[in-house]
């Protein structure tokens, strides 16, 4: 029996080759709207998913569907509860993005600290001396506050401490002190925002983390501190962030993610001097794309071979 895998958005060739070599049939999607997905999934046994949304209606349309394998670490674009009720596995590739996103995060911290993009734009506009009134800061001995100590958060902590001699404090209520390296100190929520010179967010988007950073946290932050968000846009209340920048409550933000993606062209952040916004690109490296594609494909192979996946994010009910 030949199983069919729906791929709504193209992936690295290595991921497709992994499936083809194991005898799976690949069906490239016709689009990413709900209607497209409902139509395309009807005869498929698996979905290898990037950023398209998989609603309950899409899952119900896949009468043969046994797994939705996320191409990456996040899975907030899948209706997990519905998948569980329908007996469909949802998996991710939790370690595929770690190095790429951690490296990008350090680049974001450096760019914010040195005001790289601000001064580069000024130079392009002919203002060579703009740098004299917009000096950067060094990372040495500055405090980095990390929200979330998963794989990426821990990798950022290591690079910041061992590579740049930063002091690292972290809010991670489920972390056990004994399991942490000696260069990470646990702190409470308020302490992280009050004491940090840079705050980097590394949490998944859930009901608990949605809008978790807002006006209260910006009021706590130093007016010399920077927010770095390479997690999910909805983790931050964007309206409160814009207000904090307008009132100079914080020094700046580097956001690789936004509440609305793609964003509206008139998003106020685009016109703000101390806001750097990039197009959700932290994992957009050649190496990471291969890892995500192959790891997602490997989960499909496990499930369609009658085995349990390595990285499940749900526990589906058994189909009758």
Image (cartoon, rainbow, N blue to C red):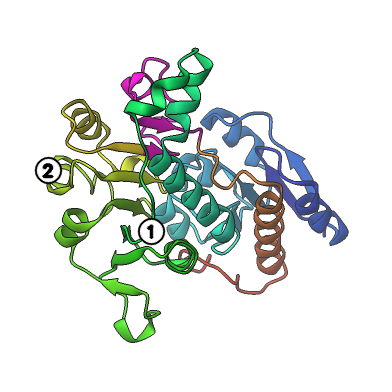
Give me the C-alpha separation between circle 1 and circle 2. 25 Å
At horizontal 70% and vertical 58% (from top left) the residue drawn is 297
Q: Quadrant of residue 96?
A: bottom right
- Residue shown at 47% from the left, 34% from the top: 116
Tell whether position 278 is magenta. Answer: yes
Q: Secondary structure at mark 2?
A: helix
The N terminus is located in which quarter? bottom right
Depth check, mark 1 against mark 2: the one in front is 1
- Mark 1 and mark 2 lie on one chain; the one further toward the N terminus is 1
| Mark count | 2
In the displayed structure, does residue 9 sit left or right of residue 318?
Answer: right
Residue under numbered circle 2: 219
Q: Which mark is residue 99?
A: none
Left or right, 313 with respect to 66, comes to: left
Q: Report which residue position mark 1 lands on.
A: 140
Q: Is residue 20 left or right of residue 99?
A: right
Question: Residue 109, how many percent across, how many down?
Answer: 42, 47
What is the x, y in percent for residue 234? 33, 41
Quarter of the view holding residue 136: top left
Q: Which residue corresponds to the image point at 42% horizontal and 27% vertical from the top-left? A: 118
Percent position (x, y) of residue 320? 53, 66
Depth order, front residue of 275/171:
275
Magenta span: predominant SS is loop
- Label 2 crowd (10 A; few <14 / some 14-19 / many >=20): some
Whether the magenta-drawn stretch holds residue 269 is answered as yes
Judge by depth and name the residue closer to the eye, 157 or 64: 157
Q: Position of residue 26 (x, y in %)?
A: 78, 46
Q: Mark 1: few, some, or many residues within 10 Å (few <14, many ≥20)?
A: few
Q: Label 1's element?
A: loop
- Rendered residue at 66%/74% (across/down): 307
Image: 76 above or below 165? above
Q: Which residues are magenta?
A: 254-279
């Amino acid at each position: 029996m030949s199983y069919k895998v729906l791929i709504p958005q193209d992936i690295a060739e290595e991921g497709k080759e992994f499936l083809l070599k194991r005898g799976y049939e690949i069906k490239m999607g016709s689009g990413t709207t709900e209607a497209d997905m409902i139509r395309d999934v009807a005869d498929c046994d698996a979905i290898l998913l990037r950023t398209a949304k998989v609603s309950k209606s899409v899952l119900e349309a896949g009468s043969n569907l046994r797994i939705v394998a996320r191409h990456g670490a996040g899975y907030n674009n899948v209706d997990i509860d519905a998948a569980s009720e329908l007996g469909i596995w949802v998996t991710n590739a939790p370690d595929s993005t770690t190095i790429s996103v951690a490296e990008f995060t350090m680049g974001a911290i450096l760019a914010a600290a040195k005001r790289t993009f601000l001064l580069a734009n000024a130079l392009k506009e002919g203002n060579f001396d703009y740098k004299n009134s917009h000096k950067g800061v060094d990372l040495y001995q500055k405090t980095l506050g990390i929200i979330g100590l998963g794989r990426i958060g821990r990798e950022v902590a290591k690079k910041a401490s061992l590579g740049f001699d930063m002091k690292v404090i972290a809010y991670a209520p489920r972390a056990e002190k004994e399991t942490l390296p000696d260069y990470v100190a646990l702190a409470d929520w308020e302490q992280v925002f009050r004491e940090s010179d840079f705050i980097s967010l590394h949490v998944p988007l859930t009901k608990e983390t949605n809008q978790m950073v807002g006006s209260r946290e910006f009021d706590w932050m130093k007016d010399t501190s920077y927010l770095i968000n390479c997690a999910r846009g909805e983790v931050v209340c964007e309206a409160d962030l814009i207000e904090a920048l307008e009132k100079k409550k914080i020094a700046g933000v580097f956001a690789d993610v936004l509440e609305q993606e793609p964003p509206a062209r008139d998003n106020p952040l685009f016109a703000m001097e101390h806001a750097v916004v990039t197009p959700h690109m932290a994992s957009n490296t050649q190496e990471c794309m291969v890892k995500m594609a192959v790891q997602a494909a490997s989960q499909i192979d496990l499930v369609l071979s009658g085995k349990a996946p390595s990285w499940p994010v749900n526990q589906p009910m058994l189909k009758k």
